[in-house]
């Protein structure tokens, strides 16, 4: 199983994985349970704060970059961080985040404008660029331009490519198969990113501590203003770097993955692109859209939600049981790894009609409600549900609307993207599309 999964954990799945209620893997030193039943999934996810904390496997690979960030911590440390970070993502913040989103999308449209009227393009590259630019502008109030920003972006790409090579052997209990060279390269990329982020954060942090509060009202500012309810203490400088690094990674890697697959799916469906175009055209000039305008883009949003069902960027979520307990009709041991896989549940034969087909309109149909309630969790569920879900929906709706308004997307003949499970679900051979300007 390890050898088939070593390049992508999707390769370790079989057709029956999409029908099973629960799967088990037992190896020396490893007990892993794959949970597909809605009631067991809910139990694991709702109890993430206590009985089923985050598995240390993910943290192990990400720690050199993310340190003690909210993504990997557990217990009281996580609760304190979550309470301090929630205000930065409160609903009102979406209005504040909209102008930097729009500015980054304008920059993307300018880049595309430089291409010939009709050209072949790896859309993954552009989606990664625009989402990284959006999160960069939202955190720091400046565009991701200049040498340092480009070096951060390049080092992140190296770190992301190496992360699965470190994580998969750890998951299968064969850490000795990790190449020391890969560990060294991953640590070096993490050190470089942290050093560059420190250079960006340091002057703002110093200014804030010296009482210069008239800084831009961005996420970095919210993090500096956040206080621990009990002790009244702010994040230390080290913690700020951890959280910013985590946010940059969580905030663009996932959205880039989903948007790339959304483009792939609509490129094969001209009828849906036509309907999206009609929906967007009603709004007039898209370059001057405001956040509330996005509410009327129902189909565009459904396209993204359906993409998240078929290609959930976080394809599997790993927890560790902190005690021996019954789960899904089995007795599992303390320390067992419990995996909830949106990739499987959201394509499960029992919970979805036509589970493999792309049908954005299913989100408007009453009979889908039950499936959504029991088998749809692209943003996770329970206390550790994604902090940036509303942010992601807003940016994705905006990007897709702007793209389809100006370009017709067509698949490249003889190119079939191959999904692989890495840090997120990506394509092994890119997602090449023909982009043809409509005017
Ligand atoms: C389509 C885009 C996105 C998807 C599919 C996604 C998915 C997820 C999932 C599944 C989790 C829970 C992981 C777990 O329970 O182990 C999560 C957590 C998180 N996400 Fe997202 N995410 C997306 C975008 C974003 C964005 C844009 C941000 C920030 C701006 C963000 C910030 C976070 C944070 C901070 C957490 C950790 C929450 C905690 O542990 O308390 N995510 N995300």
Image (tube, rainbow, N blue to C red):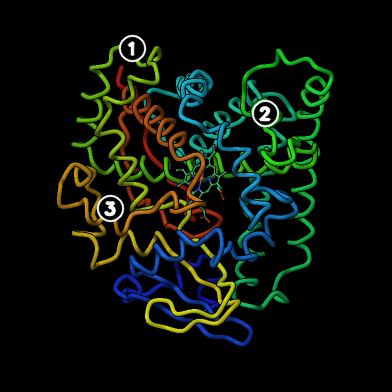
How far apart in space, not on screen, are marks 2 and 3 (Cα)?
34 Å
Residue 423, quarter of picture: bottom right
In the image, 431 versus 398, the foreground residue is 398
In the image, 365 versus 106, the foreground residue is 365
Tag on residue 220? 2
Q: Which residue is mark 3?
A: 372
Mark 2 vs mark 3: which is more N-terminal?
2
Residue 404, quarter of picture: top left
**Residue 282 higher or lower than 157, as above or below:** above
Q: Is residue 39 visible?
A: yes
**Residue lying at 38% horizontally and 51% vertically, measured from the top left:** 415
Mark 1 vs mark 3: which is more N-terminal?
1
Q: Which residue is mark 1?
A: 285
Pointer 1 local density, CA inside 10 Å: few below 14, some 14–19, many at least 20: few
Pointer 3 local density, CA inside 10 Å: few below 14, some 14–19, many at least 20: some
Which numbered mark, 1 or 2, is in the foreground of this view?
2
How far apart in space, not on screen, are marks 1 and 2 (Cα)?
31 Å
Q: Secondary structure at mark 1?
A: loop
Task: Check contact, mark 2 vs mark 3: CB within 8 A.
Answer: no
**Residue lying at 68% horizontally and 55% vertically, measured from the top left:** 62
Mark 1 vs mark 2: which is more N-terminal?
2
Which numbered mark, 1 or 3, is in the foreground of this view?
3
**Measured from the top left, where is residue 300 in percent x and y?**
29, 33
Residue 296, quarter of picture: top left
Q: Secondary structure at mark 3?
A: helix
| The CB of the residue at mark 3 lies under 8 Å from ligand 1 | no
| The CB of the residue at mark 2 lies under 8 Å from ligand 1 | no
**Measured from the top left, where is residue 127 in percent x and y?**
48, 36
Q: Secondary structure at mark 2?
A: helix
Pointer 2 local density, CA inside 10 Å: few below 14, some 14–19, many at least 20: many
Q: Is residue 436 visible?
A: no
**Measured from the top left, where is residue 130 in percent x and y?**
52, 31
């Amino acid at each position: 199983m390890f050898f088939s999964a070593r390049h992508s954990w999707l390769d370790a799945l079989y057709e029956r994985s999409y029908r099973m209620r629960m799967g088990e893997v037992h190896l020396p030193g490893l007990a892993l349970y794959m949970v597909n039943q809605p009631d067991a999934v809910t139990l694991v996810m709702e109890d993430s704060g206590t009985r089923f904390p985050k598995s240390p496997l993910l943290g192990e690979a990400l720690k050199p970059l993310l340190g003690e960030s909210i993504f990997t911590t557990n217990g009281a440390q996580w609760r304190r961080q979550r309470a301090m970070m929630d205000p930065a993502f409160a609903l009102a913040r979406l209005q504040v985040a909209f102008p930097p989103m729009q500015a980054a999308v304008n920059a993307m449209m300018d880049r595309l404008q430089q291409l010939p009227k009709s050209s072949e393009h790896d859309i993954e590259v552009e989606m990664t660029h625009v989402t990284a630019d959006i999160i960069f502008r939202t955190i720091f109030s400046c565009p991701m331009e200049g040498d340092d920003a480009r070096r951060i972006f390049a080092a992140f790409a190296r770190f992301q490519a190496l992360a699965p090579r470190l994580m998969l052997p750890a998951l299968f209990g064969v850490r000795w198969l990790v190449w020391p060279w890969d560990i060294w390269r991953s640590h070096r990329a993490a050190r470089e990113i942290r050093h560059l982020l420190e250079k960006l954060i340091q002057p703002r942090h110093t200014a804030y501590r010296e009482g210069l509060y008239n800084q831009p009202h961005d996420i970095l500012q919210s993090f500096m203003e956040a206080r621990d309810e009990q002790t009244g203490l702010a994040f230390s400088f080290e913690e700020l770097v951890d959280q910013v690094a985590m946010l940059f990674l969580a905030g663009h890697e996932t959205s880039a993955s989903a948007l790339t697959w959304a483009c792939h799916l609509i490129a094969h469906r001209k009828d849906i692109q036509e309907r999206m175009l009609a929906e967007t055209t009603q709004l007039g000039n898209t370059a001057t859209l405001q956040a509330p305008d996005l509410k009327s883009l129902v189909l565009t949003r459904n396209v993204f939600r359906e993409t998240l069902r078929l290609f959930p960027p976080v394809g599997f979520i790993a927890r560790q049981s902190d005690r021996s307990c019954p789960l899904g009709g089995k007795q599992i041991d303390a320390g067992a790894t419990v995996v909830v896989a949106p990739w499987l549940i959201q394509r499960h034969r029992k919970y979805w009609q036509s589970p493999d087909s792309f049908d954005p309109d299913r989100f408007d149909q009453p009979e889908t409600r039950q499936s959504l309630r029991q088998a749809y969790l692209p943003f996770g569920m329970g206390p550790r549900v994604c902090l940036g879900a509303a942010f992601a929906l807003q940016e994705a709706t905006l990007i897709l609307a702007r793209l389809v308004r100006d370009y017709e997307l067509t698949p490249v003949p003889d190119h079939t993207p191959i999904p692989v499970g890495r840090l997120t679900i990506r394509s092994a051979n890119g997602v090449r599309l023909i982009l043809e300007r409509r005017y």
